[in-house]
Amino acid sequence: MQLLKTTDKDFAVKFQTLVSDRREATVDVSGTVRDILADVKARGDVAVKEYTSRFDHFHPETLRLDASFIAEQAAKCPADVKAALEIAAARISSFHQKQLPQDIGYTDTVGVKLGLNWVSLTQVGIYVPGGRASYPSSVLMNALPAKIAGVERIVMAVPMPRGEINPVVLAAAQVAGVTEIYSIGGAQAIAALAYGTQTITPVDKIVGPGNAYVAEAKRQVFGTVGIDSIAGPSEILVVADAQNNPEWIAWDLLSQAEHDPSAQSILITDSETFAQQVITAIAQVLPQLSTKEAASTSWEKHGAIIIVDDLADSIPLLNRLAPEHVELCVDNPQLLASQIKCAGSMFLGRYTPEAIGDYLGGPNHVLPTARSARFASGLSVYDFLKRITYLECNQAALQEIGQAAVTLAQAEGLPAHAGSVAVRLQ
C-alpha cells in the first residue's frame, strides 16, 4: 500500500505512477479468442457445445434453458433475497424511467422541418458471469434499462460450470422479465450472440461484464455488434476527513478490493492521524472476510492513501484518476461533487456507502473503469436507444437554402451532390 503526501518532493512523480498503473490482465488472450470466434462463426452450436464441455465441464443437450428449469431453479431463491431483488428492481426501474428522452421536432425560419426521433434497439444480449463471480444484481442493472428503453428481445447468456447455476441469478431474470436464457459463457457465448448459431439468433448489442476472454471477445466483435464497454478491475476512491469512523472507511475501501486482486482502493484525507487509523482498521477487518485473499492482495499491491493539506486539493487529483466509484464522506459533499468532472458515479455523505449503489440505490452499477470515466458514462437507458434525425424541405425552403448546398458540393468536387440539389432549383 502506498502512502503519498502532496508535500513530498517526489509526490508528482509518485502520483503519476499511480495514475498510469495498468491493472488489467497482462496475459494476451487475443489469439485464443480470435480462434474461438472464428470457430463458432463457422460451426455454430456444435462449436459452442464443445467449448462449453471443455471449459465449463458441462454437456448441455440444448443451449437454451427451458421455462420449467428456470422456474424450478428460481424457486430455490430464498424469500428474503427475492424480496430484496424486487425492491432493487423497483428502485432501478424508477431511476432509469426518468432518463427517457424526448423527441425533437420544429420548423425553422425558412420553412425546413427538422427533428430527432429516439428509437430503441431491437435485440440485446446480456452476459452474466457464472461460478464464483456470479452477480444477480448485474442481471437487473443490465436488463431493466434495456426493457425500459423498449428493447423487444433481451437475451441472457450465463455459464453453468459443471451444470450448476446460482438460483438467485434466475430469480433476478424472472424479476427483470428475461425469459430467453442460454447456458453458455466465455468467448464462445459472445461469438454466439454476435454471429448467431443454428439455435441462437444474433443480437444488435452485447452488454455485461466478464473475464479477460469475455472482454477480449467483446473488443473483437465490436463493429459486428455494439458493446457497452471493456470492463476492467473495480475501483473506489474515498475522500474523507477525520470526523469519519475509520472502521466505516476501511469497510468501504475493502468493498471493492474484495472483487479482484487487481482492484484498486484509494483514500484521500487531510489527516495523517486518520489515515493511520484507517490502515489499522483495515488490518482488523481483513481477517473477517471470506474474500480476504483477494482483498488483501488488492490493498497491498494497488491500494493507496493520499494526504492533502486541504480536501479541496483532492479534486484535481480525483479528476486525473477518473475513478469508477467516488465516495465523498464529508460535510456538504455537494460542494466537492459540483467540481468533479471525471467519475463513474458519486456517493455523497457519510451514510452513503458505495455498496448501496451496487444493489438498489437506483443509478446503474455498470460503470467506466481504467480512467475511461474521462470520456465515458455508466450504463443507462441511452445505451439501448438510437437517435434518428430527419429533414423535410418544401419547394420554397429548398429555393432558400439550396444554392448554398450547390456551392459547397462544387467546392468539394462532388458534382452529383451539387446536381441533385441544382436540378430541383430549376
Image (cartoon, rainbow, N blue to C red):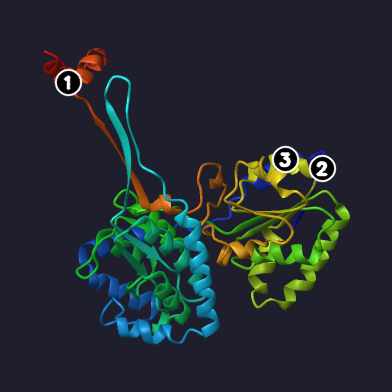
Residue located at (29% from left, 71% from top): 48
Q: Which mark is residue 395?
A: 1
The one of 42 and 386 positioned closer to us in this rendering: 386
Q: Which mark is residue 107?
A: none
| Relative image position of residue 132 (x, y in whole percent) | 52, 75
Quarter of the figure with residue 276: bottom right
Residue located at (58% from left, 55% from top): 23
Q: Is any atom of residue 23 visible in this view?
A: yes
Residue located at (30% from left, 81% from top): 67
Sequence-first tag of 3 and 2: 3
- Circle 2 SS class: loop
- Circle 1 SS class: helix
Kindly identify the amino acid type of the residue bearing the numbered disc 2: Asp
Q: Please state which of the two labelled residues, at mark 3 or mark 2, is closer to the viewer.
A: 2
* Label 3 Cα neighbours within 10 Å, binned few <14 / some 14-19 / many ≥20: few
Kindly identify the amino acid type of the residue bearing the numbered disc 1: Gln
| Relative image position of residue 178 (x, y in whole percent) | 36, 70
Measured in 3D between alpha carbons, the distance from the residue under mark 3 to the one under mark 1, in whole angstroms, is: 64 Å
Measured in 3D between alpha carbons, the distance from the residue under mark 3 to the one under mark 2, in whole angstroms, is: 20 Å
- Circle 3 SS class: helix
| Relative image position of residue 356 (x, y in whole percent) | 62, 65
Sequence-first tag of 1 and 2: 2
Measured in 3D between alpha carbons, the distance from the residue under mark 1 to the one under mark 2, in whole angstroms, is: 64 Å
Number of marks drawn = 3
Q: Is the residue 91 above or below the residue 419 in the image?
A: below
Kindly identify the amino acid type of the residue bearing the numbered disc 3: Val
Find disc 3 in the rendering and name its residue. Answer: 13
Quarter of the figure with residue 288: bottom right
Q: Which mark is residue 310?
A: 2
* Label 1 Cα neighbours within 10 Å, binned few <14 / some 14-19 / many ≥20: few
Q: Please state which of the two labelled residues, at mark 1 or mark 2, is closer to the viewer.
A: 1
Asked if the residue at tag 2 contacts the one at tag 1, i.e. Cβ–Cβ closer than 8 Å, the answer is no
